[in-house]
């Protein structure tokens, strides 16, 4: 049984991954997305890079410089290796990350102030179009219908 690269990569979404790039830097973050070129997106990403010792100084053992980057896009042709560094990100407060490929639905509007009441979305009666979807508004977006009639403003043809 063979597993395609796409399926293998999909199975690692949201895992903590370690990516090593050509210039010996290491990026560690949560694997969020990839494409056909193997470009990857890491969230909550940290960069680790080896520190070069200065001349005429004693060499410190295994020193690395660490930077917190956040959301990072790594170019696929620069990645040397990609490995699992930890389990998937925990879901906090019942909030779920949307699955890749699923379309989002309507959001939930909440009032900004504490003293504002929650309001239900407006519902149009059956047979009446929803507000904002009635079509073109007179005078907005182009000339009126009467101007577009043949013979408007031009000389009348002789009879």
Image: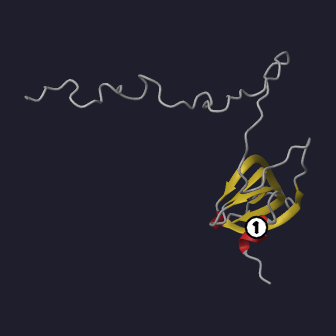
Which x, y percent locates residue 99? 78, 55
Q: Residue at x 42, y 29 (%)?
A: 141
Looking at the image, which residue sits at the far top?
115
- Residue that carries the numbered disc 1 in the rendered image: 9
Near-viewer residue (52 or 20): 20
- Residue 13 place in picture, x, y as percent: 79, 60
Residue at (78, 48) in percent of width and height: 67
Say which of 72 and 152 sits in front.
152
Q: Position of residue 5 (x, y in %)?
A: 72, 73
Q: Point out the image quarter for the C terminus.
A: top left
- Compared across the picture, whether 88 is left or right of 142 comes to right
At x 79%, y 52%, the residue is 65
Quarter of the image for residue 115 reads top right
138 above or below 87? above
94 shown above or below 12: above
- The quadrant in which residue 122 appears is top right
Image location (x, y in percent) of residue 102 = 73, 54
Closer-to-camera residue (45/115): 115
| Residue neighbourhood size for the residue with mark 1, other residues' Cα within 10 Å, grouped as few (<14), some (14–19), many (≥20) | some
Vertical relation: 156 (above or below) 77 = above
Colour convention: secondary structure
Quadrant housing the N terminus: bottom right
Task: Residue 95: tell me if it is visible.
Answer: yes
Secondary structure found at label 1: helix
Q: Is residue 54 visible?
A: no
Q: Is residue 159 left or right of residue 70?
A: left
């Amino acid at each position: 049984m063979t597993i395609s690269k796409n399926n293998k990569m999909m199975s690692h979404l949201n895992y903590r991954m370690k990516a090593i790039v050509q210039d010996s830097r290491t990026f560690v973050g949560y694997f969020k997305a990839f494409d056909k070129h193997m470009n990857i997106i890491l969230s909550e990403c940290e960069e680790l890079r080896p520190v070069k010792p200065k001349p005429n100084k004693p060499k410190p053992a295994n020193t690395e410089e660490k930077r917190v980057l956040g959301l990072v896009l790594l170019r696929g042709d620069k990645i040397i290796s990609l490995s699992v560094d930890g389990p998937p990100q925990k879901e906090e407060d019942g909030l779920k990350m949307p699955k890749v490929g699923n379309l989002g639905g309507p959001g939930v509007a909440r009032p900004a102030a504490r003293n504002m009441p929650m309001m239900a979305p407006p519902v149009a009666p059956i047979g009446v179009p929803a507000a904002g979807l009635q079509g073109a508004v007179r005078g907005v977006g182009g000339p009126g219908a009467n101007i577009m009639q043949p013979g408007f403003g031009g000389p009348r043809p002789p009879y």
